[in-house]
Image (cartoon, helix red, strand yellow):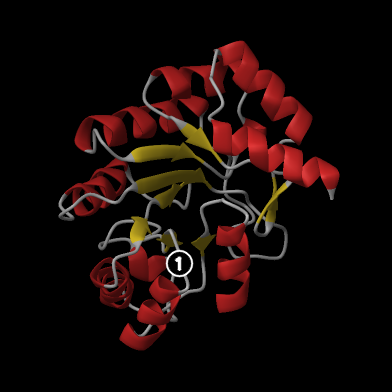
Amino acid sequence: MLEMVKGVRELGMEACVTAGMLTDDQALKLANAGLTAYNHNLDTSPEYYENIISTRTYQDRLDTIKRVRDAGINVCCGGIIGLGEKQTDRASLLEVLSNMNPHPESVPINSLVAIEGTRLEVNNEIDSIEMIRMIAAARILMPRSKIRLSAGRESLTKEAQILCFQCGANSIFYGDELLTTSNPSFEDDRKLLKDVGVLFNKDFESCNKIVSSL
């Protein structure tokens, strides 16, 4: 993993890793390799957490985020809606994130993609207005964070995604797959961003040229 981080950085790109819990030593090694950001989502509120996750505690997650921050790595930390939580749980999640000092540099907002064979496969898709509200609230509470419209975008219409941008989202995860779930195609996303009027930064354009040449 350290070699991969170094390799990505040598290409002139930022590097973000998602690898679960970290020790102090592991966080320092990633920092020394040049890691830009570490993703470690809280997923949901402290109150609802035990209904979803039993392999680690909420404090375990907060401890890893602190180790990342102490190592000088940017924090990418957000959550998932559609887990069966209440509106108060979404507010509580945002409260925890917005009380971090400093705020996470990146805040991904995901909606659950119900995968067959999992305990949550029967969960209904959330209404797009719920995602829009979550994005807007996150933007108000964390004005300098990059609010990322993340997993679950395939269930959103083009218009709903545009509203998410207008309400505060300023980033998406780009690529055909997002960890364990599918994601809109490169072509569809480039058309969406063009229609929205997003201007691509030079690093994005240069990275696309690298990918195209491989």
What's the residue type where badge 1 is placed?
A: Gly
Q: Is residue 13 or residue 53 the one in the foreground?
A: 13
Residue 166: image location, x then y, percent: 42, 17
Total marks drawn? 1
Residue at left offset 62%, top offset 49%: 113
Left or right: 63, with 197 as reference point: left
Q: Which residue is mark 1?
A: 34
Q: Residue 15: in sight, yes or no?
A: yes
Residue 116: image location, x then y, percent: 72, 58
Residue 83: image location, x then y, percent: 47, 52
Q: Is residue 210 above or below residue 26?
A: above
Residue at left offset 47%, top offset 17%: 163
Residue at left offset 42%, top offset 31%: 130
Q: Residue 1: in sight, yes or no?
A: no
Residue at left offset 22%, top offset 49%: 103
Q: Residues within 10 Å of mark 1 (few under 14, many from 20)?
A: many
Q: Is residue 15 or residue 195 the one in the foreground?
A: 15
